[in-house]
Image (cartoon, helix red, strand yellow):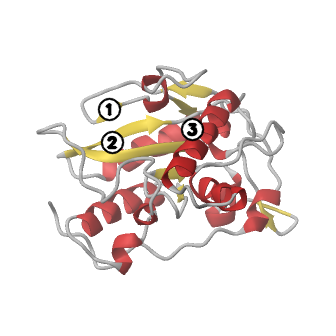
Amino acid sequence: MPTLPASFVIPTLTEQPEWWSLPCQECGEPLVTLVEGPRLHLQPVYAQLGFAGASTTITLRQGALERLERALATLPETLGFLVYDGFRPLIVQQALWDWQWAEVTRDYPHFTQAEIYEKVRHFVAEPNADPTKPTPHRTGGAVDLTLFELATGAELAMGTAFDEACDATVTDWFERYPQEPLTHNRRLLYHAMTQAGFANYPNEWWHFEYGTRRWAGHQSQQSYQGMNLAVYGSAE
């Protein structure tokens, strides 16, 4: 594995509640179906788990896909992306919320309802039927993914499983508690994606967004009355 520049640390990121009130000027980009290739593998996890409404295909907005391809081109030639999820309709978001609620209830039997809610909300965006305030995946601008080795097809170790509900899923966890090759692998994924224009959700090392309100809060170069501007509303 190549040595990464010293600047490739993952910064400590924080969520800003005001991002969700940022305006959105829908750009009208279509959803595009991802096509599997030697360096792009697809694993539509929620269809495989049998979630109601989940598709066996993975789609993203055109601009998000272009940036994903840009990120892929920057990776070492021995590596590729394994994509778990892209656009997610409301019915699947609700099913994921309910599933995570059941998991937390089982794993934390002493939690109150309020504590369960906060734990679930940490890992899953609360379903919202309002098309003007879509969850990130419902915009078609959010993608969940990891890295894999071309030679073996094996996923690179990231320290937790995808969608695992534990503290170590925080993106910068192995900056705080260094452990190789986990620190290196997370840095590689993070910087490939952010340098291509994506924003990371800091509680999930696998989750990146382009065109959404979170992305606008991070790095949009457009502005509206002094505020950054999202370009993806609901794609549903």
Q: Of the numbered discs in the image, which one, if any, rests on residue 99? A: 3
Image mark count: 3
What crowding class fits label 1: few (fewer than 14 Cα within 10 Å), some (14-19), or many (20 or more)? many
The three-letter code of the residue at mark 3 reads: Trp
**Quadrant (top left/top right/bottom left/bottom right) for the C terminus:** top right
Under tag 2, what secondary structure?
strand
The three-letter code of the residue at mark 1 reads: His
What crowding class fits label 2: few (fewer than 14 Cα within 10 Å), some (14-19), or many (20 or more)? many
Q: Residue 215 at x, y = what percent?
A: 63, 57
Q: Of the numbered discs in the image, which one, if any, rests on residue 41? A: 1
The front one of 216 and 126 is 126
The answer to which of marks 2 and 1 sits earlier in the sequence is 1
**Quadrant (top left/top right/bottom left/bottom right) for the N terminus:** bottom left
The answer to which of marks 3 and 1 sits earlier in the sequence is 1
Q: CA distance from mark 3 to mark 1?
A: 25 Å
The front one of 143 and 32 is 143
